[in-house]
Image: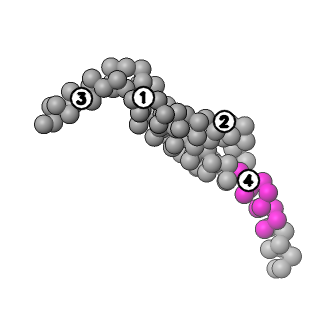
Amino acid sequence: MAASKLQAFWNHPAGPKTIHFWAPTFKWGISIANVADFAKPPEMISYPQQVVVACSGVIWARWGMVITPINWNLSSVNAAMAVTGVCQLSRKIRHDYFSDENNATASLEG
């Protein structure tokens, strides 16, 4: 049973014998790097970079579901990219537009 599932995976049109498997697999590095960037201060986050990461993640996650055969690896890595990009953008926006307002309000009240 396990051997037949492994053989089916190996011979799948988006399996490990094709670029359709390896390109998304290595793309996980971008998502992992973006998660590691959560340790960086928000001042170092780039709006253009994170907009591109989030938008390309959304576009290619959808594309992975539309093509035949469905490429689950491609869809999942790009969904992760979209989520991490949006999270990074929200950190940057909160820092740039809401943290000064909160600090000023706190100093006026205190």
Within 10 angstroms of label 3, few (less than 14), some, or many (20 or more) residues?
few
Tag in front: 2 or 3: 3
Mark 3 highlights which residue? 8
Judge whether residue 24 can be spotted in this image. no
Query: Alpha carbon of mark 2 to alpha carbon of mark 1: how far?
Result: 25 Å
Is residue 18 positioned above or below 93 on the image? above
Quadrant placement of the N terminus: top left
Quadrant placement of the C terminus: bottom right
Front residue of this view, candidates 35 and 89: 89
What's the magenta region? 92-102
Asked if residue 100 lies left or right of residue 92, the reply is: right
Mark 1 highlights which residue? 68
- Label ID, residue 93: 4
Mark 2 highlights which residue? 52
Within 10 angstroms of label 2, few (less than 14), some, or many (20 or more) residues?
some
Q: Position of residue 8 (x, y in %)?
A: 23, 29
